[in-house]
C-alpha cells in the first residue's frame, strides 16, 4: 500500500487545485459581468463542474466571496510590500497613493469587493478581514513617517483616495480625469496637515 506524501495528501492538493479553479472562474465571471452576476449555476458552468460540486468546495456563495476577498487582500498586501522605501517619506506616500489608485481602477470588481462592501449580506470572515487590516497598517506607518499620527487623518486620507477611485470608476471609466489628481491631492493633504499641526 502506498503512503500519502508527508505534509499533506494528494487529495488535499487536488482539492486546493479545484478550489483555485473555481475561484479563477468566479473572478472571470465578476470581471465580465459584475459582482451581482455571481450565480452558482453560471459559476459551475464556467468551471466545468456541476452546481452540487461547487458546494463540495465552498459551503455557500458567501464562502466564495470570502475567498475572493482574501485573494484580493493578499494581492493588495503584495502590492504594498513591493513598493520602494526611500529616504523621502512624502515621495513614498505619493508612490503608494498612485499604486493604490491604479490597483483599484484596474480591477473594479476587486475594488468593490475590498473597499465598498457592495455585496448584500456578505461580510468577510475575521481571517480574511485581518489581511485587509494588515494592508491598512502599511498606510498608517507611511503616514506616521510623514509625521501624521492622528487617526482622523488616516480616515481623511482613505476617504480622499477612495473618493478619487469612486469618481473615476463612476464617471470616467477607462479615463484619468480623477486619477491624474493624485499628486495634487497628496500635496494638499500634507500641506493641510502641516498647517493644522503647526
Image (cartoon, rainbow, N blue to C red):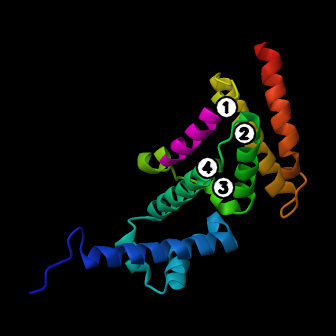
Of callouts 3 and 4, which one flags the residue occurring earlier in the amino acid sequence?
A: 4
For label 4, the SS is helix
Residue at image coords 73%, 36%:
88
Q: Residue most toward the right?
A: 177
Residue 186 is tagged as none
User: Observer-nearest residue: 139 or 22?
Assistant: 139
Residue at image coords 47%, 77%:
21
How far across and down, in percent of the image, does residue 87 sit?
Answer: 69, 36
Q: Main secondary structure of the magenta part?
A: helix
Of callouts 2 and 3, which one flags the residue occurring earlier in the amino acid sequence?
A: 2
Using a 10 Å C-alpha cutoff, classify the residue at mark 2 as few (fewer than 14 neighbours), some (14 to 19) or many (20 or more): many
Which residue lies under the disc numbered 2? 93
How far across and down, in percent of the image, does residue 30 sit?
Answer: 63, 69
Q: Is residue 39 visible?
A: no
Q: CA distance from mark 1 to mark 3?
A: 24 Å
Q: Which residues are magenta?
A: 131-142
* Camera-side mark, 1 or 3: 1
Q: CA distance from mark 4 to mark 2?
A: 11 Å
Of callouts 1 and 3, which one flags the residue occurring earlier in the amino acid sequence?
A: 3
Pointer 4 with pointer 2, Cβ within 8 A:
no
Q: Quadrant of the C terminus?
A: top right
How far across and down, in percent of the image, does residue 136 sit?
Answer: 58, 40
Tell me, yes or no, whether the highlighted magenta stretch contains residue 133: yes
Which residue lies under the disc numbered 1? 143
Q: CA distance from mark 2 to mark 3?
A: 23 Å
Pointer 1 with pointer 2, Cβ within 8 A:
yes
Which residue lies under the disc numbered 3? 112
Amino acid at each position: 500500500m502506498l503512503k500519502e506524501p508527508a505534509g499533506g495528501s494528494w487529495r488535499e492538493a487536488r482539492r486546493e487545485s479545484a478550489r483555485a479553479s473555481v475561484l479563477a472562474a468566479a473572478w472571470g465571471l465578476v470581471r465580465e459581468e459584475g459582482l451581482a452576476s455571481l450565480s452558482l449555476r453560471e459559476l459551475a458552468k464556467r468551471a466545468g463542474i456541476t452546481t452540487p460540486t461547487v458546494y463540495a468546495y465552498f459551503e455557500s456563495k458567501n464562502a466564495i466571496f470570502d475567498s475572493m476577498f482574501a485573494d484580493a487582500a493578499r494581492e493588495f498586501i503584495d502590492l504594498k510590500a513591493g513598493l520602494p522605501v526611500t529616504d523621502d517619506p512624502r515621495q513614498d506616500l505619493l508612490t503608494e497613493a498612485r499604486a493604490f489608485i491604479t490597483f483599484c481602477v484596474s480591477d473594479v470588481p476587486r475594488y468593490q469587493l475590498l473597499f465598498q462592501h457592495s455585496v448584500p449580506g456578505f461580510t468577510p470572515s475575521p481571517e480574511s478581514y485581518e489581511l485587509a487590516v494588515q494592508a491598512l497598517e502599511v498606510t498608517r506607518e507611511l503616514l506616521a513617517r510623514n509625521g501624521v499620527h492622528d487617526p482622523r487623518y488616516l480616515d481623511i486620507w482613505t476617504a480622499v483616495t477612495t473618493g478619487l477611485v469612486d469618481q473615476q470608476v463612476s464617471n470616467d471609466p477607462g479615463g484619468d480625469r480623477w486619477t491624474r489628481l493624485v499628486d495634487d491631492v497628496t500635496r494638499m493633504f500634507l500641506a493641510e496637515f502641516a498647517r493644522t499641526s503647526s
